[in-house]
């Protein structure tokens, strides 16, 4: 909880806005709720909403936290696995072209939530790396400010 208190109001607001937008956008394009744009061909269950919620929160945190560098590769892979975890297997054209509908429904559909959970773990690891980098930069800036008070703090 101490780490969460270190975020500024601007970071909290951008995290909230980005997470909300991600929730609405990803939920709509994967047709987790009825909409006139997309139709889902597999059944929606509670895990889909749980993975979508956590994925949206992680997306918001990742882009809301100000840090000089980031673990984009881990976050990207985690985001894709998370998306596959709550998305419709048969509706995903890339998966459908690569594997075919019978493979997806027989082998991937039963384990897609595990892929989503793996994606959430990987995304969480990327956020932890980003946060630790942020803390290291803040500590370095604090030490530099103590030794040379005229130095401007940069994050």
Image: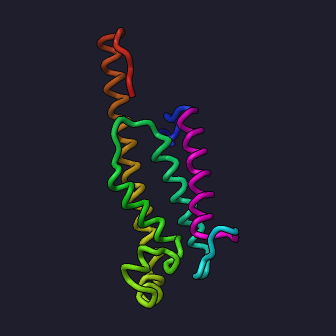
* Residue 81 horizontal/vertical position (percent): 42, 67
Which residue is farthest top? 150
Q: Say if 63 sits above or below 32 in the image.
A: above
Report if residue 12 lies within the magenta region.
Answer: yes
Q: Say if 36 sits above or below 59 in the image.
A: below
Q: Nearer the viewer, residue 146 or 69?
A: 69
Which residue is located at x 42 percent, y 63 percent?
A: 80
Q: Say if 139 sits above or below 45 in the image.
A: above
The colouring scheme, among rainbow, by chain, secondary structure or one colour, is rainbow
Report if residue 148 lies within the magenta region.
Answer: no
Which residue is located at x 35 percent, y 50 percent?
A: 72
* Residue 20 horizontal/vertical position (percent): 61, 51
* Residue 78 horizontal/vertical position (percent): 40, 61
Q: Nearer the viewer, residue 103 or 36?
A: 36
Which residue is located at x 55 percent, y 43 percent?
A: 15
Is residue 144 rendered to the left or right of residue 79?
left
Q: Say if 128 sits above or below 83 in the image.
A: above
Helix, strand or loop for the magenta stretch, by majority: helix
* Residue 9 horizontal/vertical position (percent): 58, 32
Which residue is located at x 57 percent, y 71 percent?
A: 48
Is residue 13 rendered to the left or right of residue 97?
right
Q: How many marks?
A: 0
Please identify the quadrant where the C terminus is shown. Answer: top left
Magenta residue span: 10-35
Is residue 92 rendered to the left or right of residue 99?
right
């Amino acid at each position: 909880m101490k780490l969460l208190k270190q975020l500024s109001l601007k970071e909290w607001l951008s995290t909230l806005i980005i997470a909300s937008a991600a929730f609405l956008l990803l939920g709509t394009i994967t047709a987790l709720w009825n909409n006139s744009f997309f139709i889902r061909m597999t059944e929606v269950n509670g895990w889909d909403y749980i993975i979508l919620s956590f994925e949206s929160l992680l997306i918001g945190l990742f882009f809301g936290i100000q840090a000089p560098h980031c673990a984009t590769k881990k976050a990207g892979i985690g985001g894709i696995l998370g998306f596959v975890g709550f998305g419709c297997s048969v509706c995903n054209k890339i998966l459908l072209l690569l594997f075919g509908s019978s493979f997806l429904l027989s082998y991937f559909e039963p384990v897609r939530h595990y892929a989503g959970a793996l994606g959430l773990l990987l995304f969480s690891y990327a956020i932890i790396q980003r946060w630790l980098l942020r803390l290291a930069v803040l500590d370095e800036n604090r030490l530099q400010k103590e030794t040379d008070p005229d130095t401007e703090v940069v994050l």
